[in-house]
Amino acid sequence: MHSRTIAYALIAAISMAVSALAQTYPPNGGYPQPSGQNVQPVQPQLPTLVPRGAQPGVQQPVRRTPPAPPFTLTPQQQAQVNQVLGLWEQRNSKVKTFDTRFKRWIYDTVFGRPDQPKFVDLGVIKYAAPDRGMFRVDTTTGKDGREVPIEDARAEDWKSDGKSIIEYNHVKKQMTVHKLPPELQGKTIADGPLPFLFGSTAESLKRRYFIRIVTPRGVQDQIWLEAYPRFQQDAANFHHAQFIISIEKMEPFALKLIQPNTKDYIVYQFYEIVINDPMRMFRGDPFRATKPMGWQAMVEEPMGAQARRPPNDGRR
């Protein structure tokens, strides 16, 4: 997967904030299992919308036959989805800043046990509307259950300032500034591969995803939604997503991403959530591209430019 695509996907994951307690989930995440629909993984590209089945790099006609939906909704079921997404949109419009810690379970069912996560990581997410964000994995859980620093090879550290995405490679000790093309600069993070939360509108969500309500019987205080991508770019990042909304405050509660192979999946838990922090301005700018001492700084131009050049002072 191209580094710029990975970076944009990770930053866009900010728009999928979750806040579930670890004990809420049984070992398999507690979600309905994938439907088993045979969808071949596609190669990821920059965040553009290409319907499934379209050939990457080949110009497509404006009018296309939409992909077949993986399920069919009755008029009543569609009305219920519309109502939930409408309420979700109202809530999104009020979120200006978002800060949270997160816990993440990564399941590799192909090479590992399906009932035991391969990794349990912890990190932080920060967001400021419409286009600044940070995603960083700080620590992981050791064999004795203690929290330990994550190894450099698995460290994830990204920032977005609206004009560039800044990648910190802890193995190479290299900070790379991936400049976004002009058409993506200043866009909401919701325009990325996971536009479920901040800046999302009900219509844009329905345009990009097949969405249905899958709340288990007996659950009273949550709404469970399931989304399947309509477009190739989104399908490259996940086969489908399942996310939970708390009804009381209409806030995100939990997220599960089923990978394109339909077998592996990732479950997120977010906690210590702070929305619209009035003290944010006094805490410094978390989205500033600061080069760590002793690291190398590089700039990658947009649109697949091959040449890389070091910035003057390691900052944007």
Image (cartoon, rainbow, N blue to C red):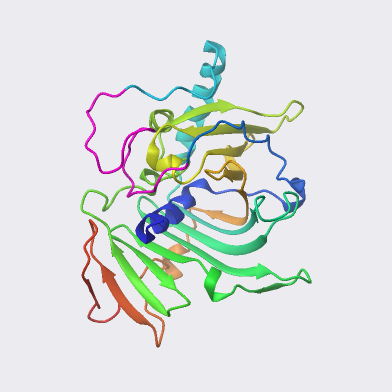
* Residue 180 position in % (x across, y down): 27, 57
- Above or below — where is 80 with respect to 304? above
Task: Write down the quadrant of residue 250 in the picture.
Answer: top right
Asked whether 130 or 305 is in front, the reply is 305
**In the image, 166: left or right of 306?**
right
Q: How many numbered marks have been drawn onto this rendered protein structure?
A: 0
Q: Residue at x 52, y 33 (%)?
A: 227
Q: Which residues are magenta?
A: 41-64
Q: Residue at x 43, y 79 (%)?
A: 172
Q: Main secondary structure of the magenta part?
A: loop
In the rendered image, residue 285 lying in the magenta stretch gets the answer no
Q: Residue at x 41, y 25 (%)?
A: 67
- Above or below — where is 290 with respect to 43? below
Outermost residue, top side: 75
Q: Quadrant of the N terminus?
A: bottom left
* Residue 271 position in % (x across, y down): 63, 55
* Residue 85 position in % (x across, y down): 49, 29
State whether residue 82 appears in this view.
Answer: yes
Task: Write down the quadrant of residue 304 in the picture.
Answer: bottom left
Asked whether 112 or 277 is in front, the reply is 112
**In the image, 250: left or right of 205?**
right
* Residue 40 position in % (x across, y down): 48, 38
In the rendered image, residue 51 lying in the magenta stretch gets the answer yes
State whether residue 195 appears in this view.
Answer: no
